[in-house]
Image: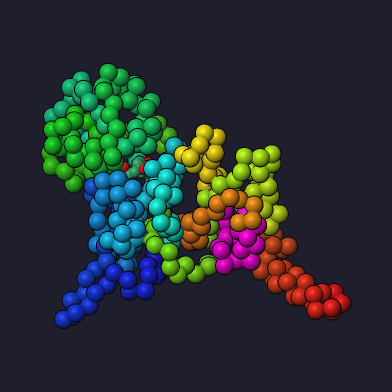
């Protein structure tokens, strides 16, 4: 997928024919799946990719205006959402997603050349990667001390630096750090895993609706009977397909949750705007997290009663009634 507009020249500075290329943050170091995704998300856009050690650090740089955009992992088909990303999206100034990409995820076990399985005492990776290879680790490295790293590529770098014996990393990481070789390839417990990534930006002009869009929000509801059902009803009554709902504690008090929702459609679509207004009235907090083209380009299945034409016709009908006309 290509991004068409990352923000009208922001981040460019021209002078004496020198044009500074904008920076785009990602979860680094080079060799992460997030780097692969960020390259897809920024294809055709002249920008330098800047690695950050954690997602919160990348988003802090974006909020501070040090980078134009940030590529972050948001959801895995096997492990579910990436909590660090959801939490970092909410804590701080609003950010919006402007594009999404999905990347097939495969894992190799990288060691320093010559290291054999029975010499591996420590193995590390990103928690999401570890979770996707638990079966393989139990069968093949049952005695190894399993450690968490800030990313798959950070683990590969630690192996190259002699700080760890093995890393679970993306196949391409082997070429980026000196002296690595693969102890095993394609070790994911679930083949065909996919991770979804978003390109985030500070609020500004939204991507144009394409008919195959997704909208993301985070909403806090009061702890009362039926509030979650009512939230869902706002969507279903308008024929809106919910593609994800995830809860995270608000961290303010036990039992209070923030719901992350993804649904088909663009905030510019009448049915989505109408539903969002309803949610705004019902929820104690609604944060808009963006409307952006879906990575798979699958068009929204809009029932006739929720179409743009149906909304326009009913708005005209209501206006006539209010003017004293006959329906
Ligand atoms: O560590 C990386 O390479 C990442 O890009 C992060 C991440 C994730 O957050 O899920 C991305 C894809 C894989 O599922 C494992 C890790």
Q: Is residue 287 left or right of residue 68?
A: right
Give the colour scheme of this rendering: rainbow
| Front residue of 25 and 230 | 230
Q: Is residue 120 above or below residue 200?
A: above
| Front residue of 280 and 238 | 280
Image quadrant of residue 43?
bottom left
Which segment did they paint magenta? 263-279
Q: Position of residue 49 (x, y in %)?
A: 26, 58
Q: Is residue 321 above or below residue 77?
A: below
Q: Is residue 88 left or right of residue 264?
A: left
One can see residue 285 in this view: yes
Residue placed at 63% from the left, 60% from the top? 277
Image quadrant of residue 302?
bottom right
Q: Position of residue 244 (x, y in %)?
A: 54, 46
Q: Is residue 213 left or right of residue 33?
A: right
Q: Is residue 139 above or below residue 38?
A: above
Q: Is residue 57 magenta?
A: no
Residue placed at 41% from the left, 49% from the top? 91
Q: Quadrant of ligand 1?
A: top left
Quadrant holding the C terminus? bottom right
Q: Is residue 264 magenta?
A: yes
Quadrant holding the N terminus? bottom left
């Amino acid at each position: 997928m290509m991004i068409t507009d990352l923000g009208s020249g922001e981040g460019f500075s021209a002078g004496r024919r020198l044009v500074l290329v904008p920076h785009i943050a990602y979860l680094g170091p080079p060799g992460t799946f997030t780097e692969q995704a960020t390259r897809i998300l920024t294809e055709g856009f002249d920008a330098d990719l800047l690695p950050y050690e954690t997602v919160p650090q990348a988003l802090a740089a974006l909020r501070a205006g040090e980078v134009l955009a940030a590529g972050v992992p948001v959801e895995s088909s096997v492990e579910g959402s990436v909590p660090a990303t959801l939490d970092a999206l909410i804590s701080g100034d609003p950010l919006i997603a402007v594009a999404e990409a999905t990347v097939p995820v495969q894992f190799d076990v990288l060691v320093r050349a010559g290291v054999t399985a029975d010499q591996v005492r420590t193995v590390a990776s990103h928690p999401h990667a570890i979770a996707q290879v638990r079966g393989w680790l139990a069968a093949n490295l049952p005695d190894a001390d399993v450690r968490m790293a800030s990313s798959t590529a950070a683990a590969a770098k630690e192996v190259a630096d002699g700080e760890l014996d093995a890393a679970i990393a993306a196949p391409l990481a082997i070429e980026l750090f000196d002296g690595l070789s693969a102890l095993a390839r394609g070790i994911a417990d679930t083949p065909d895993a996919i991770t979804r990534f978003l390109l985030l930006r500070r609020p500004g002009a939204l991507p144009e609706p394409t008919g195959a869009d997704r909208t993301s929000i985070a909403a806090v509801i009061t702890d009362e009977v039926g509030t979650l059902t009512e939230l869902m009803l706002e969507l279903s009554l308008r024929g809106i397909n919910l593609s994800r709902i995830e809860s995270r504690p608000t961290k303010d008090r036990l039992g209070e949750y923030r719901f992350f929702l993804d649904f088909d459609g663009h905030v510019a679509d009448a049915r989505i705007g109408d539903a969002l207004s309803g949610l705004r009235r019902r929820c104690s907090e609604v944060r808009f997290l963006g409307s952006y083209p879906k990575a798979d380009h699958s068009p929204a299945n809009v029932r006739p009663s929720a179409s743009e034409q149906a909304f326009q016709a009913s708005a005209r009908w209501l206006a006539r009634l209010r003017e004293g006309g006959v329906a």
